[in-house]
Amino acid sequence: MYDMIVVGGGPAGMTTALYGRRNGKTVLVIEKNGFGGQITHSPRVENYPGTLSMSGNEFADSLLDQILAQGAEIEFENVIRVRDQGRTKLVQTEEGSSFEAYTVVLATGVKHRMLGLEGEKDLVGDGISFCAVCDGDFYENQTVCVAGGGNSALQEAILLSEKCKKVILVQDLPYFTGEESLQKVLFARPNVESRTGVKICALLKKGELFSGLEIEDKESGEKEEISCDGLFVAIGLIPDNKSFAGLADLDVKGYFDSDEHCLTKTPGIFTAGDCRRKSVRQLTTAVADGACAALAACHYISFDL
């Protein structure tokens, strides 16, 4: 029996474990892949307060060492079900294990929607990025492409246009779906270009280095190569929360419908990190959620059980 089980070993989940242990609670963190989550795709992190520069992997490894030193336990398994048993919760995994706790924090994270192209995964963090705030400075005075046409893509492109020599938006629809106000701001900038009604059909490399895109006009079939130094993919995020919909409400996009208090409709069940409804998804907001969720869970154990 644990005081707290954390589902997910990203920054939010590990911060939850840290705060739980610092409050004297027994904590188990269950992670299905590798600890660190999306931040491990960032080769350099330079916007985390108090740290001049680090890699995402360095941050994840350091935080994992910290929670282990504090006495948190970890398991590498895939949680498929959480059952509310009233006073306790039963966490079941695909591997057949069952773990029991007084509280559960769902820190399941999100996945970036990928283009599905050959060699794409190998270039993540080495030519392909997902966050202009995180990685935009690495492409100062260079040419970048942005894949996507919604609000996220337009916002990424606006940020990049302030640093990059040229920004080229690549959209598979014949028009952009983002807000007109964002389009007016973006396309008024002289260093911004666009290609609409095209699909990205290949990633180009020179040796082992990313060098550009091959695109194809969806009507004519005509192909074109675009030389660029980096590609920012902004075609959406994918939360994986359906297994827990009976315990925590989901919004229309599938995120846990919880605010910064990290509460759900089920007493003793909390949520934290990118998997919940929020307007800003950054490393700092993920760890903030972890602290809030852990303290809420500790309060529940002390006063509401």
Image: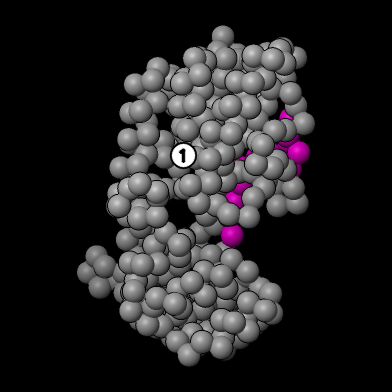
Q: Which residue is mark 1?
A: 11
Residue 193, given in percent of the width and then of the height, sits at 49, 86
**Main SS category, magenta section:** loop
Query: Which color mode does the image show?
Result: one colour
Residue 184, given in percent of the width and then of the height, sits at 63, 84
User: Which quadrant does the N terminus fall into?
Assistant: top right
Note whether residue 96 is visible: no
Looking at the rendered structure, the kind of residue marked 1 is Pro
Q: Quadrant of residue 46?
A: bottom left
Q: Is residue 195 magenta?
A: no
Q: Residue at x 49, y 14 (%)?
A: 24
**Label 1 Cα neighbours within 10 Å, binned few <14 / some 14-19 / many ≥20:** many
Residue 84 versus residue 159 in the image, above or below: above
User: Which quadrant does the C terminus fall into?
Assistant: top right
Q: Residue at x 33, y 67 (%)?
A: 138
Q: Is residue 192 left or right of residue 106?
A: left
Q: Residue at x 63, y 27 (%)?
A: 296
Q: Is residue 84 left or right of residue 207?
A: right
Residue farthest to the left?
Answer: 207
Q: Nearer the viewer, residue 203 or 254?
A: 254
Q: Nearer the viewer, residue 303 or 305?
A: 303
Residue farthest to the front?
Answer: 50
Q: Which residues are magenta?
A: 236-250
